[in-house]
Image: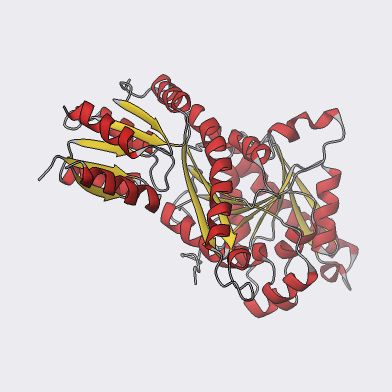
Amino acid sequence: MNNTTDKKPTLRKMMFVTQFEELGFGALQSLLVLRSAGLEHVILMNVIERDRVAMHRGLGYDKDEERRLREQANIRFIDWAENLFEKGLEVGDYIVVGNVVSDTLEAAAAEDADLIVIGQRKRKMIEFFYSGDDIIELLRRSCRPVLIYKELESNSCYDACLADNPFCRTLLAVDWSPASLLAVEYLKTMKSVVQDVSVIHVASPKELKGTSSLNIQQLRKEKRGQLTKICDELEAEDIPCRPHLYVGEPVPEILRAAREFNASMIVMGSSGTSVWRERWIGSTPRTIVEKSPYPALIIPQAKEAADQTQ
Amino acid sequence: MGKKVLVVDDDPDVRLFSQAVLEENGFTPVMAKNGEEGEEMIRKDPPELIILDVLMPRESGIRLYRNIKTNKKFKNIPIVILSGIAEKSFLRSQKVLTEFGGDPVPDPEAYLEKPVDGEELADTIKKILG
C-alpha cells in the first residue's frame, strides 16, 4: 500500500469485506466507479466468526457448519466474481474462519490492498460490551484507508449521482493533522470520480472566547485562508472545491455540513488519539463512523507504517 | 516418473483430490495454492500441463492464464481450467482484457466446472497429453 509520506497514494486494489447482510453486490457495484481512478483488482473477503462454528456446549467445533458457511459464501463470491471478471477486473477471494479485524488486516497486508471497504453491522449491546466494535478496532489498527460503506437514502432526483457514485459529492473534514492532509492527497487520486468537494474545518467555540471581534475576524480569516489553500490544491487537479468554516462541536457540525451540502460521503483523517482515550472517550472519526448516516472514508496517519495484525 | 502436472488452486480439498487422481493415473502432481505461487513454479520448472482454478487470492487464474499464454516460453503448456466460474465468464473476461489493449490469447485446452469427477479429470488430461 502506498501510504507512506514519500509515495503518492494509489487505488489499484480494493478489499471488500462483507458478511453479506450489511454489504451486498449493489454496494460493490457502486464502488466500481473507482475503475476510472485506477481500480484493477477486487479482493472479496468473508470472515466466518469463530463463535458461529465453535464453542457450542457439548458439540465442540462444528466442521459441517463451517463447510456450509464457506460454501454459502463461495456461491455468492463466484456469482459476484463472474460479473467482475466479465468487466475486465482482476478478482480474488478469502473465506476464512477467524476474527474480522485480524484476518482482514492480515489479508490486506498479504494483498497490499490500497483500500479496505467494510459495512457496519448492527450488534447487540452485549456483543458490543464484550468484543467492542470491529470497525473502530479496524480503524485503529489499519495503516490503510478504510471506507465504512453505508447506503444513503436518495430521496430526490438531484441525487441521481448518489446511486452510481458514492464519491461524487465529498465532504472533506480537516483539522490540519498529518492524517487529514493525507486525506487531501488521497482525494486527488480520485479526481476522476469526485465531482465536487466541500472542505470544512470546525473551529472550537473556545477559540472565539474572550477576544475582540477583530481577533475573531482574524481567526476566521486565517482558517479560511488555510481552507482555501486546500481548495486551490484540489482545484489544480480539476476537482471543484469550496471552503467552509463552522464553529461548534466537531461531530454535530460535520454532520450538519454533510446535510447542508448534500454530501455523498465524509472523508477525514484518522484520530491521533491514544488507544485508551479512543476506547473510553472516543474521537471525532470514531463518532462520525458510529453516528453518521453517511459513508465515511478514514485515512490513517502515515507514521503507522504497518497494520497491527496481532 | 510420470509427466509433471501443476495444480494451482487455493482450495486444499481440491488440491488433495487432484493429487490423488493424478497419482492414480501415473502423473507427477505438484501443487500451488495461488496464482503467484503457481507462476513462480512454472518459471522455475515448467510442467507439462497445468490445472488452473480461476478465483484465487494474490493472483487469479485469469491473470495467470494470460501471463502463461502470452509468454513465448510457456504458451504451449496446455491448461485445463477447473473452476466454479462459468466458462462463458472466463472467456468474456479474456476478451475484455484483450479489448483493453492486452495480447489476444487462445481458449484453454479444456474447461471443467467444479466439482469434477475423477475419471473425467483423468480422461481430459490423458487426451491432451496423449
Residue B39 sits in quarter: top left
Residue extending furthest bottom?
A: A276
- Does residue A80 sit above or below B17 in this rendering? above
Q: Which residue lies at the image location 56% right of the left edge and 41% below the top edge?
A: A75
Identify the residue at horizontal 67%, vertical 73% (top origin). A131
- Between residue A172 and residue B83, name the one nearer to us: B83
Q: Position of residue A190 (x, y in %)?
A: 58, 40
Q: In this picture, is A284 found above or below A86?
A: below
In the image: residue B26, left or right of residue A194:
left
Residue A287 image position (x, y, % from top left): 76, 64
Quadrant location of residue A76? Answer: top right
Q: Is residue B6 above or below residue A276?
A: above
Q: For this view, does A212 lie left or right of residue B68?
A: right
Residue A82 seen in this snapshot: yes
In the picture, the quarter occupied by the C terminus of chain B is top left
Q: State left or right for residue B128 relative to residue A138.
A: left
Q: Residue A4: tell me if it is visible.
A: no
Which image quadrant for residue A270? bottom right
The foreground one among A102 and A153 is: A102
Instruction: Residue at 65%, 73% (x, y): give it.
Output: A273
Q: Position of residue A39 (x, y in %)?
A: 51, 38
The total of numbered circles placed on residues is 0
Q: Taking B123 as reference, is A2 above or below it?
A: below
Toward the viewer: A197 or B130?
A: B130
Q: Position of residue B121 (x, y in %)?
A: 31, 35
Closer to the camera in the image, A211 or A242: A242
Colour treatment of the image: secondary structure
